[in-house]
């Protein structure tokens, strides 16, 4: 048996009229949700970064000594402030499309190449007495396990010649970022933190747009 169903033009018009009557309120709710999300996302990004093992190791662990960052707290706080301030939001307001109300929202939490932070003072250590700078954040985020210093290695221990007071570079085998923290452009401290906290981001989206 064959059954043909035809949607009458009158029904389509009635459906669109109903949707159109709801549209102003839905748009208002959507705008409120976007505003709440804009306010909440920087705090969420801060939480995600500061909950990571890399953050703890940079702030007070051996990674800070490995990278030779004397004032890691100030540097990381500056980076987080940049990341939190540079979140990009894109959205289209609710509209009627094919007998439905649709809207879109997206947020870019970080620049894919980290160009907004890599060239800042927070991402480098300046050794004015020896006349060089160390791009520690680039090493951490992008260089993976590649040897960075070919003929020196980190030796831990108190020293008045150390920038951090707890480690020195001494002649020996090559040095690279410790493998447990090493990163590439697609797999690093920040991308791993986002992936590990995906449920937190999804819960935030559900909360503001419920």
Image: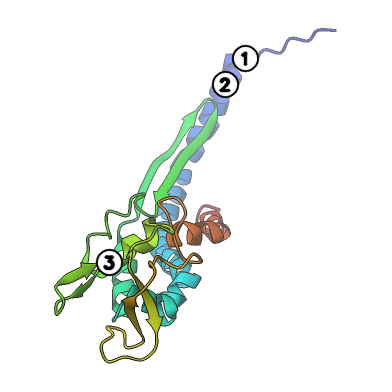
Rounded to the nearest angstrom, the CA distance separating label 1 from label 3 is: 64 Å
Query: Considering the image in quadrants, where does the N terminus appear?
Result: top right
For the residue pair 184 and 28, the one nearer the viewer reads as 184
Q: Are marks 2 and 3 in contact (CB under 8 Å)?
A: no
Q: Which residue is mark 1?
A: 8
| Secondary structure category for the residue under label 3 | helix
Between circles 2 and 3, the one closer to the viewer is 3
Check disc 3: other Cα within 10 Å, few if <14, some if 14-19, many if 20+. Answer: many
Please give the residue where the numbered disc 3 appears in the rendered image: 123
137 vs 44, left or right, is: left
Alpha carbon separation for disc pair 2 and 3: 58 Å
Q: Outermost residue toward the right?
A: 1
Q: Residue at x 50, y 59 (%)?
A: 192
Q: Secondary structure at mark 1?
A: loop
Residue 152 sits in quarter: bottom left
Residue under pointer 2: 12
Q: Nearer the viewer, residue 93 or 27?
A: 93
Q: Quarter-wise, where is residue 40 in the image?
A: bottom left
Looking at the image, is 122 positioned above or below residue 11? Answer: below
Colour logic: rainbow
Badge 1 or badge 3: first in the primary sequence: 1
Q: Earlier in the sequence, mark 2 or mark 3?
A: 2
Which x, y percent locates residue 159?
31, 91
Q: Which residue sits at x=42%, y=64%? A: 45
């Amino acid at each position: 048996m064959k059954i043909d169903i035809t949607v009458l033009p009158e029904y389509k018009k009635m459906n669109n009229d109903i949707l159109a009557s709801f549209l102003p309120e839905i748009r208002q709710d959507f705008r409120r949700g976007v505003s709440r999300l804009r306010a909440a996302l920087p705090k969420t990004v801060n939480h995600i970064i500061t909950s990571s093992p890399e953050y703890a190791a940079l702030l007070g662990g051996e990674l800070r000594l490995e990278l030779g960052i004397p004032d890691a707290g100030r540097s990381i706080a500056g980076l987080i402030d940049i990341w939190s301030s540079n979140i990009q939001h894109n959205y289209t307001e609710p509209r009627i499309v094919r007998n439905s109300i649709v809207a879109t929202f997206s947020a870019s939490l970080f620049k894919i190449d980290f160009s907004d932070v890599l060239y800042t003072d927070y991402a480098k250590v300046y050794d004015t007495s020896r006349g060089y700078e160390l791009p520690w954040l680039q090493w951490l985020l992008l260089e993976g396990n590649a040897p960075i210093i070919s003929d020196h290695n980190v030796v831990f221990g108190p020293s008045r010649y150390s920038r951090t007071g707890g480690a020195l570079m001494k002649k020996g085998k090559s040095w690279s970022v410790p493998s447990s923290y090493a990163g590439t452009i697609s797999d690093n401290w920040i991308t791993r933190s986002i992936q590990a906290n995906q449920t937190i981001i999804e819960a935030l989206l559900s909360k503001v747009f419920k």
